[in-house]
Image (cartoon, rainbow, N blue to C red):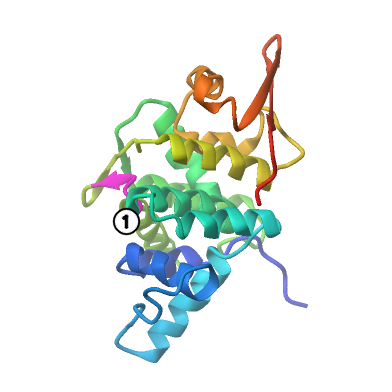
Amino acid sequence: MKETTIYDSGVNVIGSIPDYGVMLDYISDVYGYTKESEGSFHFRTEKSLKRFIAAIESCILNFSGESHRKLFFGALADHSLTLQERLMVLFWQLTYANKLFNRITSEVFMCAVLAGRIIITAEEVLAFLRHIKEAETGELQWSEGTLKITASKYLTIMKKLGLATGTVKKTIVHPVITSALFVYFIRFVQQICPADKTLHNPYFIFSFTDEQALINRLKRIENTRYWNITQIGNELTIDLKSPLS
């Protein structure tokens, strides 16, 4: 009987997709709500196309339910969002849909962000992958070469998402979380972890914001139409005012 593992090598394939803007259009056209650029996702061989499509379906198009699916595709079809805003939507979706991407991002990349660091290297990611391989039975039983590729491809993804720059050593880029993105993020967090409406929700680590700044933004008057905030002592609860249509 084949042992079930948590992590797969989808990060390697997603990191190899050349143009994320085109990929987002393709996802929106083929799986979502738009039909404007269908067919734009071309590669030199049919094999490459099938490989990328399989990775998209397994690493991105996983949802907690229909409301989450509508939220994601609604954002991709929203022409008022810039490409960088849509790339942030993709970033958050990857943290949900691919467990290895989530793990590296939460335990390596976001830890560096929250520590105030400006540089992150593939060697750090590689060391973390080696740790998983050694500490967790059956996980990442890949060659050293594959582990190195995965570490490199992870940082390539972050660069294509606009969250890192550079070549060997990557400089961490703090994204601009616009009002529209902030509202999306709060809805996203509650869609995928509906039982936790507090700041203990594990997906808040991906906000690029410290807790006090997050609280201050949640309480801004322009956001009162989207949710109610209840605070008792240090415990804050967010209640969305209306479900997504």
Q: Position of residue 146 (x, y in %)?
A: 42, 67
- Name the residue nearer the viewer: 186 or 123: 186
Q: Report the magenta residues as a range.
A: 160-165
Quarter holding residue 201: top right
- Name the residue nearer the viewer: 79 or 60: 79
Q: Position of residue 116 (x, y in %)?
A: 36, 25
- Lateral position of residue 175 relative to residue 104, left or right: left
Does 164 appear in magenta?
A: yes
Residue extending farthest top: 233
- Name the residue nearer the viewer: 110 or 162: 162
Q: Which residue is labeled 1 in the image? A: 160
Q: Is residue 28 above or below residue 194?
A: below
- Lateral position of residue 137 relative to residue 97, left or right: right
Amino acid carrying mark 1 in the image: Lys
Q: Is residue 100 above or below residue 186?
A: below
Q: Residue at x 61, y 58 (%)?
A: 70
Does 222 appear in magenta?
A: no
Q: Residue at x 46, y 80 (%)?
A: 51
Q: Position of residue 2 (x, y in %)?
A: 73, 76
Q: Position of residue 159 (x, y in %)?
A: 31, 52
Q: Is residue 155 visible?
A: yes
Q: Is residue 199 visible?
A: no
- Name the residue nearer the viewer: 204 or 75: 75
Q: Is residue 45 above or below residue 159?
A: below
Give the quarter of the figure containing the N terminus. bottom right
Q: Residue at x 67, y 64 (%)?
A: 5
Residue extending farthest left: 167
Report helix, strand or loop for mark 1: helix
Q: Residues within 10 Å of mark 1 (few under 14, many from 20)?
A: some
Q: Residue at x 31, y 48 (%)?
A: 162
Quarter holding residue 99: bottom right
